[in-house]
Image (cartoon, rainbow, N blue to C red):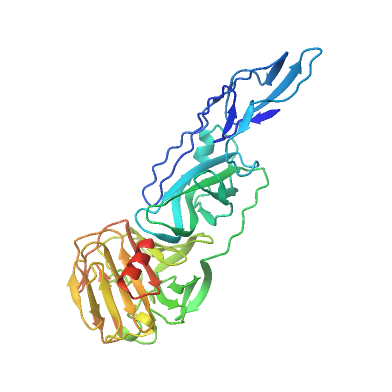
């Protein structure tokens, strides 16, 4: 009989002391990662009857990856009957080809989640090294398996992608929490991985975020990103979204290069750099590139030609998240566009994070109380666009209509004063199929 001492295994042997530790990664919070791996196992073998048992290699202590061969040697006139109680499998190892796994415990962190992509930074190369493995990590070996409270596999094909910018085994694992995760619920996933040379093939998943390069939009080479509820157009030299088209083909930004001012060229997201006019559709002073791509997320990084400013967009199936990486002066974040496809000051409205609602005909300037977020709704289409600033601050935010043609909403904008300075800083935008406060808030919290 052969016994493989497997990383994070769960073999119960007579006299066995199981000390293998499974790292736990809490998600939706800063991961607290314990990478303790490869603790040796003590194997004690006893006999019942006349004979002996030979263990190769000998000795009670066996490290990770060791193969221990047990041979029963009956005395003359006796025969070996069976292994009784010597080996009982107590683990829920999904498939024998894999020698490594870690566990991720996922909590909803106070908000109900629906088909939520979860993200966690993992250094698989470091985990292998800590386990004494000399061979290189194989990203094609990755699998994400969900288990229930009893340890039984309930989903062995969880969609995922591993963003490893440097191809060194360290990166961000993105995987999908299928269905609904209740407010106080917890879910457990096993992440299986292994080394090169075993013939692994990366599984295929339905692409929920489809990026097409070099699409011409309003005269500029653009990225077109298509999801289930929206199509984004991103000007590569401009560093801004020119269009956000919903499932009814209505454009919530509607940048137009041949119409000056509020009817066209002023529109866009995020329109951040003032007075230089960069990170704005139609601008020409930046370079954009796709830095990672997968079925759950596309990541675009934009840098100005003088290298003074840099930002990153991550587009998920139902929202897009921006991170400010580098800035040389204060900035703002704007939504200048057309809710529901056209600006309607008499019926469209804006709702602030404290529940205050005003028609788009009314302007205001004030620091948003509580969380920094708003949504702009079109009641005729029962749809809204939401915008959230991740970091709370005391900067003035504002809204005004411009020439009855577009919105001018800004985080950190007071008249023409740019008031934001944090780096890094995060913002999220997306469309939601409701204009009701409670429903919209639920969706925004889920993003």
Q: Is residue 120 above or below residue 227?
A: above
Image-quadrant location for residue 262: bottom left
Q: Is residue 335 visible?
A: no
Q: If the image is split into quadrants, where does the C terminus sit? A: bottom left
Residue at image point 36% right, 73% down: 385
- Whole-percent x and y of residue 339? 35, 80
Give the residue drawn at x 58%, y 51%.
156
Against 189, residue 267 (above or below) is below
Location of residue 379 (image quadrant): bottom left
Q: Nearer the viewer, residue 323 or 50?
A: 50
Q: Is residue 17 visible to us here?
A: yes
Question: Where residue 320 appears, x then y in whole percent?
Answer: 41, 66
List x then y, in percent, for residue 264.
Answer: 35, 84
Q: Assign the N terminus to one quadrant of the image.
A: top right
Along the line of sight, which residue is nearer the eye, 194 or 325? 194
Above or below: residue 140 compared with residue 101: below
Residue 163 place in picture, x, y as percent: 50, 54
**In the rendered image of this protein, does residue 192 appear above or below residue 340?**
above
> Quadrant of residue 446 in the image?
bottom left
- Along the line of sight, which residue is nearer the eye, 243 or 66? 66
Side of 361 where 65 appears, left or right: right
Is 69 positioned to the left or the right of 385 in the image? Answer: right
Report the side of 199 relative to 127 (left or right).
Answer: right
């Amino acid at each position: 009989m052969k016994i493989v001492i497997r990383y994070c295994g769960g073999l119960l042997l007579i006299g066995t002391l199981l000390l293998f530790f499974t790292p736990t990664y809490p998600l939706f919070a800063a991961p607290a990662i314990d990478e303790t791996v490869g603790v040796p196992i003590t194997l004690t073998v006893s006999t019942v009857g006349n004979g002996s048992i030979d263990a190769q290699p000998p000795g009670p202590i066996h490290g990770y990856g060791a193969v221990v061969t047990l041979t029963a040697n009956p005395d003359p006139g006796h025969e070996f009957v069976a292994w009784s109680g010597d080996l009982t499998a107590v683990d829920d190892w999904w498939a024998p080809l894999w020698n490594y796994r870690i566990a991720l415990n996922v909590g909803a962190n106070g908000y109900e989640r629906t088909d939520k992509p979860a993200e966690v930074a993992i250094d698989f190369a470091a985990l292998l090294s800590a386990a004494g493995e000399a061979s290189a990590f194989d990203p094609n070996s990755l699998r994400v398996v969900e288990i229930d409270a009893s340890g039984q596999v309930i989903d062995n094909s969880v969609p995922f992608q591993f963003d490893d910018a440097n191809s060194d085994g360290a990166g961000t694992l993105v995987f999908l929490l299928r269905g609904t995760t209740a407010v106080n619920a917890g879910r457990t996933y096993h992440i299986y991985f292994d080394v090169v040379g075993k013939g692994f093939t990366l599984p295929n998943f339905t692409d929920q975020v489809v990026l097409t390069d070099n699409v011409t939009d309003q005269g500029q080479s653009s990225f077109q990103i298509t999801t289930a509820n929206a199509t984004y157009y991103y000007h590569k030299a401009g560093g801004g979204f020119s269009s956000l088209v919903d499932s009814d083909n209505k454009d919530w930004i509607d940048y137009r290069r041949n119409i000056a001012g509020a009817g066209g060229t002023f529109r866009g997201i995020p329109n951040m750099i003032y007075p230089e006019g960069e990170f704005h559709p139609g601008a020409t002073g930046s370079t954009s590139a796709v830095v990672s791509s997968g079925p759950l997320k596309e990541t675009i990084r934009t840098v100005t030609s003088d290298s003074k400013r840099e930002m990153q967009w991550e587009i998920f199936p139902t929202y897009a998240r921006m991170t400010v990486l580098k800035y040389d002066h204060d900035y703002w974040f704007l939504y200048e566009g057309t809710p529901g496809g056209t600006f309607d000051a008499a019926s469209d409205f804006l709702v602030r994070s404290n529940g205050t609602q005003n028609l788009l005909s009314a302007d205001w300037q004030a620091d948003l109380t509580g969380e920094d977020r708003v949504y702009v709704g079109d009641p005729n289409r029962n749809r809204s666009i939401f915008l959230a600033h991740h970091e709370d601050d005391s900067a003035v935010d504002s809204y005004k209509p411009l020439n009855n043609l577009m919105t001018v909403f800004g985080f950190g904008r007071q008249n023409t004063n740019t008031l934001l300075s944090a780096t890094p800083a995060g913002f999220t935008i997306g469309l939601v199929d409701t204009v009701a406060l409670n429903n919209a808030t639920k969706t925004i919290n889920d993003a």
